[in-house]
Structure formats: C-alpha cells, structure tokens
Amino acid sequence: MTQSVVLKLTPGRHLHPDDFELRNTAPPGSLLEGEVRLRVRWLSIDPYQRGLLDQTPMFGRRVMVGDVMAGRGIGEVIESRSERFSPGQLVIGETGWSTEAVTQEHALIPLGGSAERLSPESICHYLGVLGVPGLTAFLGLETMGGVDADDVILVSSAAGAVGGTVVQLAKVRGAKVIGITSGALKTSFLKENLKVDFVIDRLQGTPLSQQLLEAAPDGISGFFDNVGEQTLVDGLSAMRPRGRVLLCGYLSGYEAAAPVAPSEALRVIMRQRIELRGFLVHDHAALFGEARSSLARLLHAGQLQAVQTVTEGLGSAPAALCNLLAGRSIGKVMVRVSEND
C-alpha cells in the first residue's frame, strides 16, 4: 500500500499541519511507455509550495483539496518502461508527497549513480547545496554581476537554503557579508558557523533601516533578496548609488496580510540608479552542470557547508513546511521518506 499526504482543507492565511492528511492510497497502476515508477527516498520542502495552495499560484499548478501535495524529491527507480532509466537508478523529479510515484521519463534528472553507490549524505546534497538552492545561490550571484573583496553584500533569509549558500559563496570571494535572519539560534549559527560579518536579527525590535546603517555606513553594493515586501524596501534604502539587487524569493509575501506599497521603493531605485533584476534559476539551466561542479569542488574542499534541516518520515512533511514558512528551520529543509536511508 502506498502512503500519500493530501490537502485536506483549504488553508487560511497561515498554513497548519492539520490542513493535510496522511492517507493510504492504492499504488500507481501499470506503466505506460516512457513512464518510470519510483520509490521516493527524499522530499524537498520549499517556500514556493505554499504558493501552490493559492487560488492563482505564482508558479506551477494549484493543489486542490483532495490532491496529493506537489513537490520535488529523489526517488529510486523500481520499475521502468523507459530506455533512459533502469531499476536501482536514482533520479530527481516531481514526485509529490508520496512513498511511490509514477513519472514521465522527460521529467526526471538522473543523479549518475545507483542507490548502492551513493551514500545517503551525498544523495540529499542534490536537493540542497548541489541542487536548486545551491545553483540558485551560485548563478544568482553571477547574474547580479559577481562578487569581490570590494563588495558589501546584504542577504535576506540568510540562514535559509539559498541564503545560507549565498553568504558562504560571497565570503569565499572576499566580500563583507551582512545577513538578515530571525531569532537567537539562527543569529548564532550565522555568526559562529558561517562567519557572517554582521548579522541582523529581525526579532530584536530595532528598525531594520537603523541596523543596516550601523552595519554598512558607506552603503551596500549588492543585495540578494529572498524575502520581498518590507525587507526589500528597507534594503533598498541602504544601497549605494548604482548598487545591484537580485529579486530571488518572496518568502514574506506567501502569507502576508497585504502587500507593501511600491512607491517608496520605486523612488529609491530611481534616485540611487539601482540595477534591479528578477531571477529564476531555471532560466539558466544550460549552466547547471558547470555550476554544480564548482559547488562540488568547494564542498569537498571544506569551503562550503551543507546547511540543512532533516525530518523523518512522510508524515512529517506538513509540519516541516509550516516550520519553514514560520522561520523555525535552518538551511535546506528535507524529509527522509525511506526507512533504509
């Protein structure tokens, strides 16, 4: 019997674990030509998944009540009607929150090894530092114009999956890094583990604009924003003339009561001649191989840490997503689905 997590209730403003339900479901039926059956090993938990529950998702297809929750994962091929994939091979793709999934071959990316050859630790890196979050950090910094020792880089959600990699890459390249986070645990982690030069805790109560002035009296040259809303507006106010801003995420907007009016931000952008870009990592898919190789070299050299929060069992996925959205997780959030990993 297959287990799946389905959406049980239409969420309110804030998502709750009780909005989901773990159910026993019939296994997927016989395979069609070009399909692959997977045993799901790992699930990726990401902020964008909250948006899939909205009436008009920013990305992807809306998840309706009664649907299996959508999401990416790593699976082991257990049956195949594809010439590209064989039993035992590990792949990444849209698995949904289930213990088994059937997926079209064109929607899967091979990991280049079997379940026996890749250790559990190296497998999960392909959802984190060597996966979309790591690629987003690496290619996002390149899109922003690169980073060097003359830069002062501001990173919002700096203890998150993308932000935690961005701050490390910027430090490797010699920049001064300012990280925005929330809570004493993540503040301590950024200071002690990732050696961030100046950490701003949003929960301290001091206005962000005031803390940014203290952290960077001469202004910020680059802002890698994963949050949006008021954090973006405050960060813009601290930019140097002709500074660069990358709009990479919208974490604060997924459960916001109302959007922040853009007029103040637009005035700052014009006055400071700020270069502002929206960024979606999949626009740069042709560069994934080269970027992943660079990240792997840094990881193996000890210059890059795999920052992650792992929960156990398919049933832990709803709480893992809720904790991520509430800012209670550090780094890449993943669920280990299979008991043998």
Image (cartoon, grey):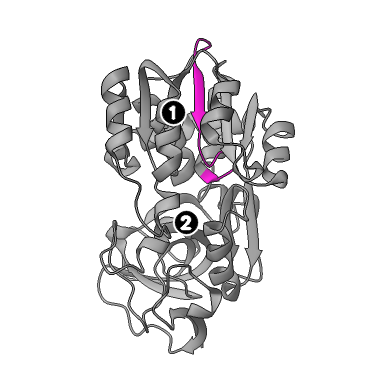
Q: What percent of the width, then of the height, locates residue 198?
A: 64, 26
- The residue where tag 1 is placed is 223
Q: Is residue 141 above or below residue 66?
A: above
- As shown in the figure, which amino acid type bears the numbered disc 1? Phe
Residue 167: x, y in percent? 56, 30
Q: Residue at x 32, y 70 (%)?
A: 81
Magenta stretch? 149-161
Q: Position of residue 292 (x, y in %)?
A: 46, 36
Q: Is residue 228 among the parts visible in the rendering?
A: no
Q: Secondary structure at mark 2?
A: loop
Residue ranking furthest to the top: 150
User: Quarter-wise, where is residue 212 in the image?
Assistant: top right
Find disc 2 in the rendering and name its residue: 46
Q: Is residue 24 left or right of residue 338?
A: left
| Residue lying at 28% horizontally and 58% vertically, measured from the top left | 106
In this rendering, the answer to whether 298 lies above or below 121 is: above
Of badges 1 and 2, nearer the viewer stands 1
**Foreground residue among 10 and 126:** 10
Residue 111 shows in the view: yes
Q: Amino acid at mark 2?
A: Asp
Q: CA distance from mark 1 to mark 2?
A: 21 Å
Residue 297 shown left or right of residue 225 in the figure = right
Q: Is residue 41 magenta?
A: no
- Residue 280 on image: x %, y %: 32, 42
* 19 in relation to 55, above or below: below
- Quarter of the image that includes the C terminus: bottom right
Q: Nearer the viewer, residue 80 or 337?
A: 337
Magenta part mainly helix, strand or loop? Answer: loop
Q: Residue at x 45, y 34 (%)?
A: 234
Q: At 36% from the left edge and 56% from the top edge, which residue is drawn? A: 258
